[in-house]
Image (cartoon, rainbow, N blue to C red):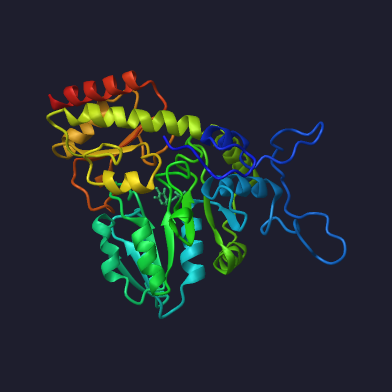
Amino acid sequence: MNDTTPGDGIGTGDGTRAVRAGLPEPVKHEPTLPGPVFAAHFHLPGDPTGPYTYGRDENPTWTLLEQAIGSLEAPGADDVETLVFASGMAAISSVLFSQLRSGDAAVLPNDGYQALPLVRAQLEAYGIEVRTAPTGADAQLEVLDGAKLLWIESPSNPGLDVCDIRRLVEAAHAQGALVAVDNTLATPLGQRPLELGADFVVASGTKQLTGHGDILLGYVAGRGEPMTAVRRWRKIVGAIPGPMEAWLAHRSIATLQLRVERQNATALKVAEALRSHPDVTGLRYPGLPDDPSHKIAAQQMRRFGCVVSFVLPGRERADRFLDALRLVDDATSFGGVRSTAERRGRWGGDDVPEGFIRLSVGAEDPEDLVADLLRALDESAR
Ligand SMILES: *Cc1c(COP(=O)(O)O)cnc(C)c1O
């Protein structure tokens, strides 16, 4: 595993970087990670200058979390600004709605996160042209002409297709378009889109970044003028995380490398175990050497995620399988320390077969998990 990162004083290994990310300089008798600051307003005599004026604009607990996320998404880069949001969707909307104007065109993936069609409808209602194309085969290139913003989700959720981010960024920049990459599935330890040339990295911190299935969070990181507009959007929409959530997120990031390493390694083992089962088809995991995503994934990713997807023969079989699992909760979302799986077609938004399963691999012992999955596959066949 290539764990080398530019030096910025918090080590070069991902584990060291994760445990130290965003910690303030040591102060005698102060905690290592200061507790959440609950404040709607701050003492502010005289001219209202920052850093802390009003709780919707800034909060010291966010500042530390933003420094932590920024140091993982863009190690060693001191010109990158990170902003945290109440959820991944708040972060996504803040980029789209702060950058696009009536008359602009934007390119979205048609196989991305299931709320993107809702976003599309809202953008169109504001007079923004929205074009979509699949993530795989870099198909978004074909509809890029004249667009102001390209939205990439790689690996895509739930289909796990991958596009060549550098190639798309080059094409977009050549015609003056900005590029945002949804990095939710990979996490910053799996992929660093800003280093691949993207203007924005955006993610839901609800998933593997925080990893316990107990908070919602989002973030945007980028540089310069475009980020000023994102900051203004956060201020006017007020889609801000509570201090408690921000603090829990920061605490959770300390174990990011441990969780990612364990979950992703187990995901590969699970994928290898599932592929030999006769009832499993359409198995996808970008870490499998013969997966259609693997070649490009290996060029631009350092780790391949904790999500495995596959198809069982029909809806009833898939439901019986989910029912038979003991160590895997039937629940949506992904990235948590407890494994989850769901029949994705139940939501109706994704273009997937009825028996399509999205499995999020947790931190259980791999042998236990593989045994549970294979047992449930066999039991549900009857
Ligand atoms: C979950 C998810 C989101 C939305 O994040 P929330 O925190 O639920 O708002 C966006 N993109 C991807 C890829 C996701 O998986």
Provide residue 158's location: percent of width, then percent of height.
30, 47
- Visible residue check, residue 81: yes
Q: Residue at x 23, y 53 (%)?
A: 351
Residue 211 in percent (x, y) is at 48, 36
Can you see residue 115?
no
Along the horizontal axis of the image, is 95 left or right of 309? right
Q: Is residue 268 left or right of residue 50?
A: left
Q: Which residue is outermost to the right?
A: 46
- Counting the numbered discs, the total is 0
Q: Quadrant of residue 145?
A: bottom left
Image location of residue 46, percent across then percent down: 87, 65
**Vertical position of residue 80 compared to residue 372: above or below:** below
Residue 297 x %, y %: 32, 46
Tell me which residue sits at (35%, 77%) in the image. Answer: 146
100 with respect to 268 (left or right): right
In this view, which residue lies farthest toward the bottom? Answer: 103
Quadrant in the picture for the N terminus: top left
In this view, the residue in front, 34 or 27, is 27
- For the residue pair 228 and 336, the one nearer the viewer reads as 228
| Picture quarter with the C terminus | top left
369 versus 75 height, above or below? above
